[in-house]
Amino acid sequence: MDRRNFISNTAMAIGVAGSNWAMPSWARGIHGGTLARKGSDVLSGEHLTMTVADAAYETGSRHGPAVVVNGSLPGPLVRLIEGQNLVVDLVNASSGDTSIHWHGLLVPFLMDGVPGVTMAAVGPGERFRYEFQIRQAGTYWWHAHTLQEPMGVYGPIVIDPASPDGHVYDREYVLLLSDWSPLSPHTIMRKLKVGGGYFTYDKTTASDDYPLSGAQRRMWAGMRMSPTDISDVTGSTYSYLINGHGPADNLELGFQPGERIRLRIINGSAMTFFNVRIPGVPMTVIAADGQDVLPVDTDEFQIGVAETYDVLIEPQGADAFTFVAEAMDRSGMGVATFSARPGATAVVPPLRKPPVLTMADMGMGEMARDNGGMVGHDMAQMDMAQMDMAQMDMAQMDMGQKDMSNMDMSSMNMRDTAKLPSSVKVGPGLDMVSMNPVDRMDYPGLGLDQLDHRVLNYTQLAAARPNHQVQQPTRFKEIHLTGNMERYMWSFDGKKFSAVTDDPIRFAFNERVRVKLVNDTMMAHPIHLHGHFFELVNGAGHGQQPLKHTVVVQPGGSASFDLTADAPGDWAFHCHLAYHMHAGMFQVVTVRPFAKAGDAA
């Protein structure tokens, strides 16, 4: 099989091609009369046309409205060659506003596809032409920057290098992971605004078997928080898809024993972190966010929304293996089967026990993620209700060993705003402050730190092609990720986007800045900067920090990256959880050239 050909292994839905009589009644009328095809066609060349249209979609027992591009969900795979020129005509035949953002591609800012920042939204019946040169190789994706994205306006991008990249493999699959709900995005947003935990059915009770003591349960209740509040939107409404196929669709991916297979894995979901594994098959990570890294052998990894990972696998010893993309909150999974012969099946593992949030996810510094204690303090004898948490030096505390089962933590000060810099706005949009956030680059993701097999984390990534000429940062900038879960308000530095439209984050052209993101919430946030790659400050040596366009900032922790602001223009900077972004966790980064000598200030 030619590796340049994308193999979708999907068939057109029965009755779609001109067989309106075969469609269920819900698929006709208001949804445009056509069912979305599952899987991606391939678009290649220098002039492409992408047409957005209303449609219907079904998987398993769920069905409802969708928006498709060129008739399929996901939309077409755009396969390009590094160095080529590209023209794309976007045609909007749908009933809503649309656009295309070329996620991870280095394009002129006016081609970046963000309504309200770089362009006006493309309205129903309108067209827009994108034109730019392809300046890179790797695995990326495209998506609308409107609420059409969660309904199906997204698809993969693969850019083949102008010269061989050194990776040897026999077969290739592009696997786009996503989530889909029969509820419209507007309905989901409305329900989240009414109650942030609307879709979270997995609650702790007195009779459950979560590893929580009575004191810990009282602590969570006193803070009006839930230790199982992992994802805002869950499998209670989401079906988890692989190339548009839900678990009931039996997606099959062929292979021959002994083959080396490259998987280009993209998280194109609206709200879901996925834990990816193939039981019985090790994986070797060779690229992150489209950029080559030194190979890392692993058995599982968590992929945040908007991230991509390329891995190599060599399935052998059986006729079939299950590819599992389990939602981080373990409310469901996407499933596909690698089959050496048609119809071969493998065991689909059951959903694992949902994880629970811990002291570390509250921003309690060096507190452990299992038991607890403090160096020099017998926590079992201390009443936290009598302690002024604002005055405690959490940096000197090691919560790693002591038993916390007898602690009363109901009066912990989780809103000590004195710890915040003056740039953070204190108000109703901020209901928690991380008391001692620490760098959590070595954390593999919620629910993955206690497994008995290898799990990837950011500290294992190093650039495959070092750049030792890179300069040290000349400026430091700290940005806080803030929110109020109960009111479903999300923001940067306590200010939602609607309040800062005239106050962008400013970088000088070619300025080198170290940016520290501090997560003052108990949810993981995948933060994406348009138009640039940044280098993770993950402990890699000088010039070997891995390039990424999206970084997951763990709950209650921090993450840092070095940015060379080398792309003039206005660029979106936001959490890639769709409903967090639309609720306010969005900003504009503006990069402007230095004034030339003699120019007016």
Image (cartoon, helix red, strand yellow):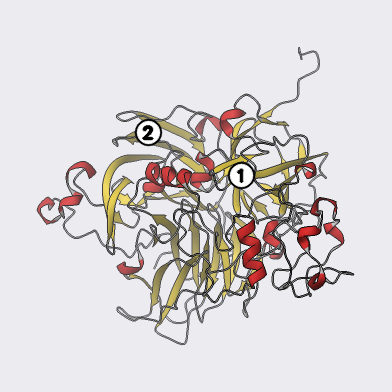
Amino acid type, mark 2? Asp
Image coordinates for residue 594, horizontal then vertical, percent = 75, 25
Instruction: Look at label 1 and name its amino acid.
Output: Gly
The residue singled out by tag 2 in the image is 97
Whether residue 325 sits left or right of residue 456 in the image: it is left
The N terminus, quarter of image:
bottom left
Q: Position of residue 52 (x, y in %)?
A: 32, 40
Q: Is residue 539 visible?
A: no
Circle 2 residues within 10 Å: few <14, some 14–19, many ≥20 = many
Is the C terminus in the top left, top right, bottom left or bottom right quadrant?
Answer: top right
Q: Seen in the image, is 254 located left or right of residue 386?
A: left
For marks 1 and 2, the one nearer the N-term is 2
Say which quarter of the image contains residue 445: bottom right
Label 2 element class? loop
Q: How far apart are marks 1 and 2 (CA)?
A: 28 Å
Q: In this view, does 99 lie above or below 213?
A: above
Q: Which label was assigned to residue 483?
A: 1
> Depth check: 140 or 220 in front?
220
Closer-to-camera residue (556/149): 556
Q: Is residue 212 above or below residue 514?
A: below
